[in-house]
Image (cartoon, rainbow, N blue to C red):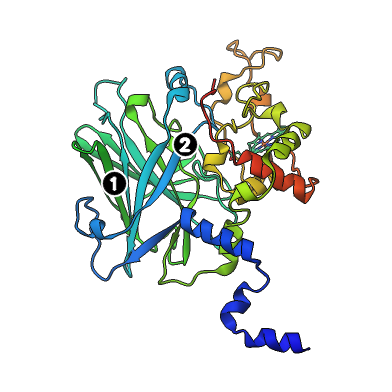
Amino acid sequence: MKRRMKLIAIGLSSILIAGISKAEDKNLKEFMKYEVINGQYVKEEISADPDAYLWKTVRGKKVFLYPQISVRLNDKKANSLIPKKKLVSALVKVAYNDRDIAVYIRWKDETPSIQTVYDTNRFADGVSIEFPNRFGKGITLPYVGMGDENHPVTVYLQKTVEGRDYQKVFISEGFGSLTEIKEPADIQMKYNEKTKEWTAVFKRPLKTENSNLKAGLVPVAFAIWDGSKYERDGNKSLSRWKFIKLKKFPLDKEYLEYVSWGYPASKLGNPERGKKVALQNGCAACHRFDDQNTAPVGMAPNLSDIGGIAVPVYLKESILHPSDVVIRNLNLNRHYNKYAKPDKFKAYPNNDMYQWYMVVNGKKQSKMPPFSHLSEQDLKDLIAYLSTLKSWKNFK
Ligand code: HEC
């Protein structure tokens, strides 16, 4: 009884963290330090000009972007360049006022490429940012590549195309399912010859018809295209989900706890044991990762750099509930079933083995079975292991 009285007396702030051990508290701090970008509140109008004075006053955070290799694209030349790619390091800043939010992103690119109208072999540099259309307590994170059927995202895209300002806003439910929308957005992008850097600023209203970012913690992710590396469409570099903190709005503790689950994965479990868990459970029958290259190419996402683009909670969801986030694969028609009967044009039907999902009652269902039978320790070790996978050097 006495103890209980004492607890009540500790006060509100400690009750909020009561039950959270010191170690977890420290992990949360690390999450805030590495994964959370603090938005800076300003009273004045925000300029989308990368050179505006405002951007010199806002503190930035480093964000790393990894080659997108989960979904393999049908482009031999671009695929052959993947093992040579470098990690992209970008500096991200966020400012907001009562109406708008603007995201600034700057990265090095020694070879600025502008897509010309007539030369179809030259590709544009570009950058995009995405926000989930819905997020918050009880809502799982979308596929970071471009959303998925259960989690549409709004994507803002800027490319460098000769003679026109190539900007687009669209809603995406995964590769190959984009719907362009007319939403107000102010996007500007500039190249600095001296520093060899691109800078882009994306400005939009906090609240639009499709998404409301007036929240304490807003998921955001980034993609960058390097035209000189033949990057286009899904061939790009991709960040993991990052989180923008907007102090003016209430921070939902439960949501924070959810997105920071298992962070940092290096302390979650034993990666060596986790690799054994992966092998014992047959992950390598469908996926390629690490030194495991026996699964047929394109059978399932390549997990070789999944540790770079997935936060621990996303990995947990992917393993326990594969059908919550179903990734669309693009290249079905690379694979024909030559054992089946050809159609009247003598074409073989697609080989369904390479389709990543089935459609059941109009809904996509992952072909990956749920691994909900794993013990808690196995699951943690497995996620600790997957989080170490950050290399695309052996991509074939
Ligand atoms: C029967 C084939 C199969 C097996 C076995 C399998 N997966 Fe998958 N996995 C898939 C397919 C197909 C997808 C893509 C569809 C989807 O999003 O669920 C996928 C998606 C994933 C993703 C999401 C990838 C991304 O880029 O976001 C992760 C992570 C993953 N699997 C991990 C595992 C792990 C760990 C195991 C072993 C415990 C495993 N898978 C076993 C077929 C499989």
126 lies left or right of 130: left
- Figure quadrant of residue 222: top left
- Residue 22 position in % (x across, y down): 62, 66
Mark 2 CB lies closer than 8 A to ligand 1: no
Residue 152 vertical position relative to residue 306 in the rendered view, above or below? below
For label 2, the crowd category at 10 Å Cα-Cα, with few meaning under 14, some 14 to 19 and many 20 or more, is many
Q: Nearer the viewer, residue 278 or 217?
A: 278
Residue occupied by mark 1: 200
Residue occupied by mark 2: 66
Q: Nearer the viewer, residue 196 or 147?
A: 196
Q: Secondary structure at mark 1?
A: strand
Instruction: Name the amino acid, label 1.
Output: Ala
- What residue lies at 28% left-to-right and 30% top-to-bottom? 110
238 lies left or right of 160: right
- Residue 102 position in % (x across, y down): 32, 57
- Mark closer to the observer (2, 1): 2
Number of the label disc, if any, that sits on residue 40? none
- Residue 258 position in % (x across, y down): 61, 60
| Residue 134 in sight | no
In the rendered view of the protein, which quadrant contains the C terminus? top right
Mark 1 CB lies closer than 8 A to ligand 1: no
- Residue 238 position in % (x across, y down): 45, 39
Question: Going from the N terminus, do you reach mark 2 or mark 1 first?
Answer: 2
Q: Secondary structure at mark 2?
A: strand
In the orientation shown, which residue stands out farthest toward the top? Answer: 346
213 lies left or right of 257: left
Q: Total of numbered circles in the picture?
A: 2
- What residue lies at 59% left-to-right and 13% top-to-bottom? 347
Q: Quadrant of ligand 1?
A: top right
